[in-house]
Amino acid sequence: MNQTFARAFAPAALIGLLLAGCSGASSGLPTTSAVPDLTAASPARRPADSVVWVTNFTDTTSYDLRSGKLLSTLTTGMQGPLSIVFDYNGNMYVGNQSGGIHSHGDIVEFAPGGTSPTRTIASGVDDPFSLAVDDSNNIYCANQFSNSVTVYASTGTKPVRTITNGINYPVVAMIDPSSQNLYVANTSVSGGKGSVTEYAPGGSSPIRTITTGLNMPESLALDRKGNLFVGNYFGKNVSEYAASSTTPSQVFAKGIVPAAITTDAKGNLYVAADGKKGVFEYATHSGAVIRTITQGINFPRSISIAPGGQLVVANYGQENEAGSVTVYGPGAATKVLREITNGIVSPKITAFAQVVSIGGL
């Protein structure tokens, strides 16, 4: 599903936070990202409509992507919202960091059109940097500072499963819409260069562990062929892994610090460079850069593909900047089609509600 995860402070704070996490010192939030593009999966996983949701510094807002009009502002239950995801019934889940390291936080659920939480999940939650949902509407929460991924049923507030095997400072949890396998990006800040672990549905032990070619993996994406892309923050590149492989088949964006990545229906890879350098689109079959977008890019923290192939970027900004959400047309477009600033304050995640099926597609 279209998912991206916790981003808040500038990248310089990210490094300090991840290292401080080992010593218990307090700091800000790390920058992470994962945006599996649903148009790259089956039609049953495609975005439902043109409403885009954004997690901001203290609230969550929604917008009509066609006009940029602010549709709603959710404040009840919001305590430092980070991650956001939708299940296939249209329910929205927001992960709240709620303060500094080891403040735990929670996950709040909103029914479609609701303005107050219908469920609050706190048990097992410890800084929910990433959320994912599977076909059964189970919720997966990557808890960076408790080294676990907790799984919750579509009802109830207690974990039905806690995954710790292979988990080491997880910053991304992602479900493959085709296989329903779980992928976790582990930053392993206590040593090493990190790992990506893969779990079969219902499993708690990795069926694949990737360490080769990684250096602080902070973003994940899949294409329709099952190829896995990993953004390496310290490695300054994006590594591609064929299904079941543990060694890279290609390396993209060499020398670029990836703040976020995603793929589109064609299998092209998008990489948002940290800072103001731009968003780069790569043809994965050749590795060539086919589009470079710089207009409107300002410390991006999330990128996603909207209905119709439009690219949506959450620009966190820096220092006293409020940030923005910028929208770009499909194809070769490089100019800002629409800039959204109303209600935007340090935007972290963009997301679209999902539907179970779209008739005729």
Image (tube, helix red, strand yellow):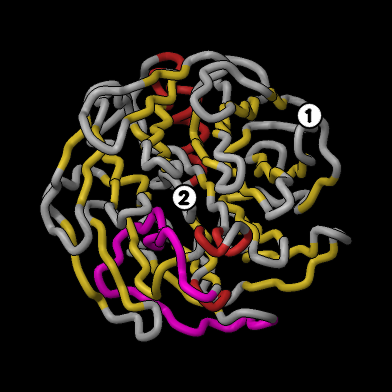
Mark 2 secondary-structure assignment: loop
**Left or right of 92: which side holds 151?**
right
Give the farthest residue toward the right. Answer: 286
Question: Does residue 318 appear anywhere in the picture?
Answer: yes
User: Which residue is tagged 1?
Assistant: 246
Alpha-carbon span between mark 2 and mark 1: 24 Å
Magenta span dominant secondary structure: loop
Return the x and y of residue 318 as percentages of the image width and height: 42, 57
**Left or right of 307: which side holds 277?**
right
Q: Which circle marks residue 308 in the picture? A: none
Asked if the stretch drawn in magenta spans residue 321, the answer is no
Q: Which circle marks residue 4 in the picture? A: 2
Neighbor class of circle 1 (other Cα within 10 Å; few <14, some 14-19, many 20+) is some
Task: Classify residue 340 by image quadrant.
Answer: bottom left
Asked if the stretch drawn in magenta spans residue 343, the answer is yes
Q: Residue at x 21, y 30 (%)?
A: 156
Task: Classify residue 148 by image quadrant.
Answer: top left
